[in-house]
Image: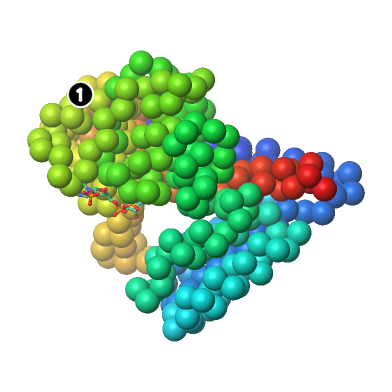
Amino acid sequence: MILLDGKATALSIQNDLRLKIASSLANGFRPPGLVAVLVGEDPASHAYVRNKALACKNVGIYTEVQHEPGSIPEGQLIEIVQQHCERPEIDGIIVQLPLPKSIDPDNILNAILPTKDVDGFTVTNSGKLMLGMPTLAPATPLGIVRLLQHYQIATDGKHVVVVGRSRTVGTPVALILSQNSLYANATVTLCHSHTVDLRHYTQSADILIVAAGKHHLIAAADVKAGTVVIDVGIHAVSDSSKKMGFRYEGDVNFAEVAPLCSHITPVPGGVGPMTIAMLLSNTVDSYQHSLKQS
Ligand code: NAP
């Protein structure tokens, strides 16, 4: 069994990005810029934004975090997003989800200019992704594909089973891997909570991508020998032996499933770091596009 080390792969991507940015600065250009909009006081959202901002800083992306109270009216939040879109020195704008229930996330996300939508969540970029056009795609699916590429795991002609059809992970990764493009061409089955006999599908997967948000949904009996397993799920499980009082586990029962696999991602240290690396990569792509236009 080979561990798909997302942490090391993400670090090497970040090193490449750091060199690209340094070379651009040496040629007299401005640094890339990212604004993260954070609404409310959800501790997990604050931690995610902190980690993203730190990773940006480490590669040389200028970053601002705009924190607004959970009571902010939807219209005011749209105005804030639109104002950041007009700033020439800002290449990427992200809005940390979830938003308070009083705000429709679609209205906020679609206020982002598609060329600065480095999370790839706007209707325009989702549509382009569906049509196989070049676009800014969501970071987690991109991170999964990049990890498969890094470990030279072929997808052409393989049966990929995706568990979970969210807009941010399951649906876009299924789309990307089923497209007629160099590193795709898989036959993809997209499963969800209405799938009857999930095991029937997971057992036939060459590559199994699990993004259901259900702790230890996938056990040894769900997987055939030699499968490549990508575990997107992340759950804090209480553990008094840890300083923090918890540890992270995934949607896959790693201890049971890992011995059967050809490759598997750990949790933590698998898909998570790749997601951040691809957000940075999208920001640098958007930056380079903007420099070419100016
Ligand atoms: P989500 O929006 O809650 O979607 C979950 C999907 O799983 C839904 O499509 C749901 O089906 C399906 N599902 C739920 N229970 C199922 C079951 N028993 N059998 C089959 N399908 C089932 O979740 P998400 O945002 O995609 O995230 C999934 C997990 O990945 C979460 O643990 C999240 O924290 C984690 N995540 C990690 C990263 C990272 O960077 N590591 C990034 C994003 C998300 P229905 O559509 O029928 O409801």
Q: Judging from the image, what secondary structure is the residue with disc 1 in?
A: loop
> For this view, does 256 lie left or right of residue 141?
left
Q: Which amino acid does label 1 sit on?
A: Ser
Return the x and y of residue 175 as percentages of the image width and height: 39, 34
Return the x and y of residue 250 as percentages of the image width and height: 29, 48
Return the x and y of residue 9 as percentages of the image width and height: 53, 37
Task: In this rendered view, identify the residue nearer to me: 271 or 242.
Answer: 271
Vertical relation: 28 (above or below) 40:
above
For image coordinates 44% across by 80% down, the residue present is: 70
> For this view, does 5 lie left or right of residue 32?
left
> For this view, does 204 lie left or right of residue 101?
left
Vertical relation: 1 (above or below) 9:
above
| Residue 255 appearing in the image | no
Q: State how the image is colored.
A: rainbow
For image coordinates 47% across by 33% down, the residue present is: 131
Q: Quadrant of the N terminus?
A: top left
Q: How crowded is mark 1: few (under 14 residues within 10 Å), some or many (20 or more)?
A: some
Task: In this rendered view, identify the residue nearer to me: 245 or 131.
Answer: 131
Considering every residue shown, the one lying at the far left of the view is 197
Residue 230 quadrant: top left
Which residue is tagged 1? Answer: 204
Residue 14 quadrant: top right
For image coordinates 48% across by 69% down, the residue present is: 46
> For this view, does 221 lie left or right of residue 167?
left
Callout count? 1
